[in-house]
Image (cartoon, rainbow, N blue to C red):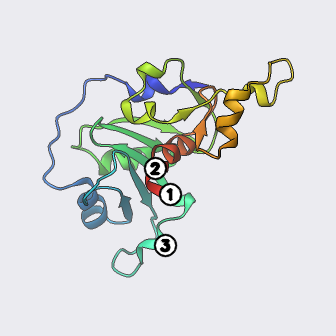
Amino acid sequence: MYEITEILMNQKKRNEVTVDFSLTGTLEAIIRGYYVEGEGGVNPDRWLRVYYSPLADPEKTIISTFKFPESLVAYVSLDDQIAIVKNEILNKFKVDTDGYGLSYYSTESFDIEEYFYSSKEQLPSDFREIVWVDDDFMNNDEINFDFEKFEIIDSGVKYLSPKKFSINQLMNCVYAPYRK
């Protein structure tokens, strides 16, 4: 298990941003093979979703062919200068995003529930707004049933357990209010 605050609040010395183009422009138009979702527009996302397909020809491939789970390779916060990147593309992604001042954290999969947090106050603000419910009482007969927590769960609201979640679950909850 990995403490998510250690990843998100990583205070490594960051490189100066030395680029002339947006991350989207660089990855999609200059390097190619990438599709970046969430940058620009009226309400840009704090966490960008970066898709990559080495076989894609951006001049002939429609964007929707990039957007499938296997091609999601990174989540990037330009505000926090953090990139959470799949191991399989980490080295290429570092080269392709050189100059954006990012700190990189690699992971084998975005779907493995191997993260937790121990202090909500240490989470960045966009993660503090997630509904966090310790749901261990649901699967452990030795823990008293918590009717208040069950009411939250039963309401259908998207929530995460602070004791176990994946990167995809975390990001899906961050964007839940926008995806209704």
| Label 2: element kind | helix
Determine the residue positioned at 57% across, 41% down.
108
State the residue in front, 111 or 164: 164
Determine the residue positioned at 54% across, 18% down.
118
Type of amino acid under label 1: Lys
Q: CA distance from mark 3 to mark 2?
A: 25 Å
**Residue identified by numbered label 1:** 180
What crowding class fits label 3: few (fewer than 14 Cα within 10 Å), some (14-19), or many (20 or more)? Answer: few
Whether residues under marks 2 and 1 lie with C-beta atoms below 8 angstroms apart, the answer is yes
Determine the residue positioned at 64% across, 47% down.
156
Question: Residue 97 in the image: x percent, y percent?
Answer: 29, 48
Numbered tag placed on residue 177 in the rendering:
2
Question: Residue 30 in the image: x percent, y percent?
Answer: 24, 64
Determine the residue positioned at 29% across, 62% down.
31
Q: Is residue 73 left or right of residue 82?
A: right
Whether residues under marks 3 and 1 lie with C-beta atoms below 8 angstroms apart, the answer is no
Type of amino acid under label 2: Pro
Residue 56 visible, this orientation? no
Q: Nearer the viewer, mark 3 or mark 1?
A: 1
**Residue identified by numbered label 3:** 65
Q: Quadrant of residue 142?
A: top right
Q: Of marks 3 and 1, which one's residue comes earlier in the chain?
A: 3
In the image, residue 2 sits, relative to residue 55, either above or below, namely above
Q: CA distance from mark 3 to mark 1?
A: 23 Å
